Amino acid sequence: MTTFATEELKLSAPPTPTYRAIAVLVGVFFIIGTVAGVASGLVGDGVLGATDVLAAAAADETSLIAAALLVLVMGFPLAMIPILLYPLFRRHNQILAMGAVLFRGVLEAVAYVGLAVLMFLTATVGRQYGAGADSQFEVWGATLLEAMDWVEVVLAIVFSLGAMMLGWLFFRTRIIPRWLALWGLIGAAFYFVAPLIVMFDIKGLELSLGTSMGWLLGPLAIQEMVFAVWVIVKGFEREGVRELMS
């Protein structure tokens, strides 16, 4: 009777997760998020980088809406990454694993949604402005642009804190090579400095690889792409996964 019960429990238990598949998904999500983010910047730059943003939004509303949608395409896959990694990382440090889910998952996703909403609102205000609405819309347009700048600063802080947590967990668990994890950890620390500098000069500086902040943002941006390709091709280190599962 005990044997039958044990066999029944084995049959009803959920299958053991395939960590090779998780590694591939994590890498693919990193690439999707990065490509969508770059595409969003390219598509929306013609409007958001214009001298008269509202006039540009009125003339090319489609590009701004497409850029906002790409922000969401970027944000949702990136938010899934710490969730996918949680079953592994919780075996090492549950609190830190939850912190990564909170910062790189929940808070980062909220920031991306907020940024996309502000872009949608800018498109709406631009439409009204183009239709000859009251000049008060210029104030709304300027406010929305400033709000986008601040959301990007907050997003960078949340992102970098979450990246430091993930970098430390990768380093400690050894499920990727330690040199790659250390690169991500140091890159996240540099990345964290950039929004703090921009915060006190919100109009004079920009969080972009093509600006003076690029040298602070670049190391982590490159590491994430190297990491993505690495885990897609090689998966997680078996020894590191074996130690976590023991």
Image: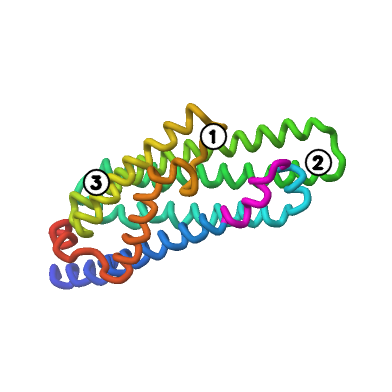
Q: Which residue is mark 3?
A: 168
Instruction: Give the side of residue 231 with respect to residue 143, left or right.
Output: left
- SS of the residue under disc 2: helix
Looking at the picture, how far across and down is residue 53, in whole percent?
71, 43
Nearer-the-camera pick, 1 or 167:
167
Whether tag 1 and tag 2 are in contact, CB under 8 A, the answer is no
Real-space CA distance between mark 1 and mark 2, rounded to the nearest whole angstrom: 23 Å
Question: What type is the residue that disc 2 sits on?
Answer: Tyr
- Mark number, residue 65: none
Q: What is the image's colouring?
A: rainbow
Looking at the picture, how far across and down is residue 67, in whole percent?
61, 54
Q: Nearer the viewer, mark 3 or mark 1?
A: 1
Question: What type is the residue that disc 1 sits on?
Answer: Trp
- Mark number, residue 150: 1
Which secondary structure dominates the residues rendered in magenta? helix
Q: Which residue is mark 2?
A: 129
Real-space CA distance between mark 3 and mark 1, rounded to the nearest whole angstrom: 27 Å
How many tags in the picture? Answer: 3
Instruction: Point out the tag, 1 or 2, that comes first from the N-terminus.
Output: 2
**In the image, residue 184 lies in the stretch drawn in magenta:** no
Q: Residue placed at 13% from the left, 68% from the top? A: 2
Q: Is the C terminus in the top left, top right, bottom left or bottom right quadrant? A: bottom left
